[in-house]
Image (spheres, grey):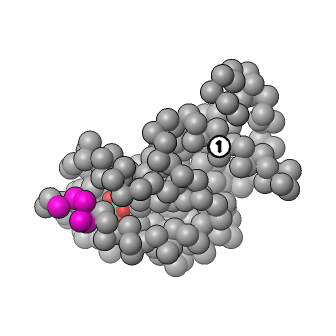
Amino acid sequence: MNPHDTDSDKQALITTGSIVTKPIVLVGMMGAGKTSIGSRLAMALDIPFWDADDEIEKAAQLSIPEIFEQHGETYFRDGERRVIARLINNGPCIIATGGGAFMAEETRKTISQEGLSIWLRAPLDELVRRVKRKPNKRPLLKGGKVKEKISKLLNERAPFYELADHIIDSENSDHEAIVDSIIVFLKNQQAGI
Ligand code: S3P
């Protein structure tokens, strides 16, 4: 798809419902754009969008920083595992996961059995630039040295993210272009290309 295509061209590429037969699960680091790209993708495909972090917050009636502060990371990860297992059983949809979700073996197994995983891969500097926009949102980055923390997490996590079914580079900050490339991937996949 090129930048001059109109919305109706884009729509023509999508035979509603037919290119998505199971949940598409976006994985990747904080700042990779999972929520923003995921919600746009869901809108383009006319299917529901779920943000796992939002669902954990709703279930706990607490914000993520509050969950970490009051109950700790293990409690959060347990909630994350349960929420993803629930969301993935609702038919075709887009699910944006928190950056650590795909590290859990059980969650990876659920996602690979029930869904199609896509790693939104972005380079370190881009991730750092994006997470700095909302400094208090992510408890794992508390206490400064954001670049070092992100770098360490990225090194630990990249081998797991690589296990995703597909990788899309999200360096380009034009989210619409990234959505378009995911749609092209889904179309090609459906066509067996
Ligand atoms: C986390 C990422 C966050 C959130 C929590 C832990 C992580 O989600 O789940 O703060 O371990 O990387 P985003 O990736 O949406 O920021």
Q: Position of residue 153 (x, y in %)?
A: 34, 69
Residue shown at 69% from the left, 42% from the top: 183
Q: Badge 1 is on which residue?
A: 181
Instruction: Where is residue 145? Give x, y as percent.
Output: 17, 61
Main SS of residues in magenta: helix
Q: Is residue 98 visible?
A: no
Query: Which of the pair 168/61 is nearer the observer?
Result: 168
Q: Is residue 152 left or right of residue 107?
A: left
Q: Quadrant of the C terminus?
A: bottom right
Q: Position of residue 123 (x, y in %)?
A: 41, 56
Q: Residue furthest bottom?
A: 105
Q: How many marks?
A: 1
Task: Establish if 15 lies above or below 115.
Answer: above
Inspect this view and state whether residue 165 appears: yes
Identify the magenta region: 145-149
- Residue type marked 1: Ser
| Quadrant of the drawing holding the N terminus | top right
- SS of the residue at dot 1? helix
